Amino acid sequence: NQKCVIQSNILDDSGSGQHALKFHGPAWGGSGVLHANGGYTELTVLCDNKFIGGLGPQIIRLTPQSSSHNERLRNIIFERNWVLGVSATDRFVWIAGTDMTMRNNLLHAPSAATSALWGFQIEKLGLEVEPTRVQCYNNTIYTAATRSGFNCVNIDATAVDTTLKNNVGYAPNVTGPAFRSGSGASGLVESNN
């Protein structure tokens, strides 16, 4: 659960209810080798990959398996990735962790759909700790497709100390696009978006 690099891959064609990448950890507080650090999945870099949406609505989930699992992620860098949405995509990257950095990524959805589209979803899923110190730098979130809504970043009310700097979002064919929805519990820092 520590020190992992996932680099230079093409991950696509996920099935219904599946993701191109689902990254989570062991149950919190267990014993044994998997729990030497308390049970965190940490010290991971995901870079230079191409993720393509499939039949599921979310392409990447850096979250526990579900709201009933207390699985914790921290110290993860997600950088220089190309995330390509399809008509089923409503969220590119869902984040529920601590000290997570999203930087220099391209999130692009060329396909029209009836659903809204969110770039980064920063949200506590269930039993894990609230998202803390999630940082988004220098990302581009783009769709020229017609969608019912568009947010580059959606921040849940539980998030703490979120930083958004130098990100670009563009959705010329969406009525009322917004860069950000929500501001978290406290500590939001944002500039040059």
Image: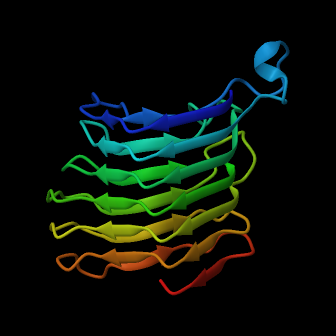
- Which residue in the rendered view is the most extreme toward the bottom? 192
Residue occupying image coordinates x 61% and y 74%:
183
- What percent of the width, then of the height, locates residue 169? 36, 75
Q: Is residue 64 left or right of residue 38?
A: left
Image quadrant where residue 13 sits: top left
Picture residue at 38% right of the left edge, 39% below the top = 8
Determine which quarter of the picture holds residue 24.
Answer: top right
Residue that appears at 27% across and 42% down: 53
Residue 176, position in %: x, y? 30, 82
Does 182 appear above or below 111?
A: below
Instruction: Find residue 116 and report its horizontal and vertical position in percent.
Output: 30, 62
Relative to 59, say whether 28 is above or below. Answer: above
The N terminus sits in image quarter: top right
Query: 176 or 96, which lies in front?
Result: 96
In the displayed structure, 90 sits above or below 159; it is above
153 sits to left or right of 109: right
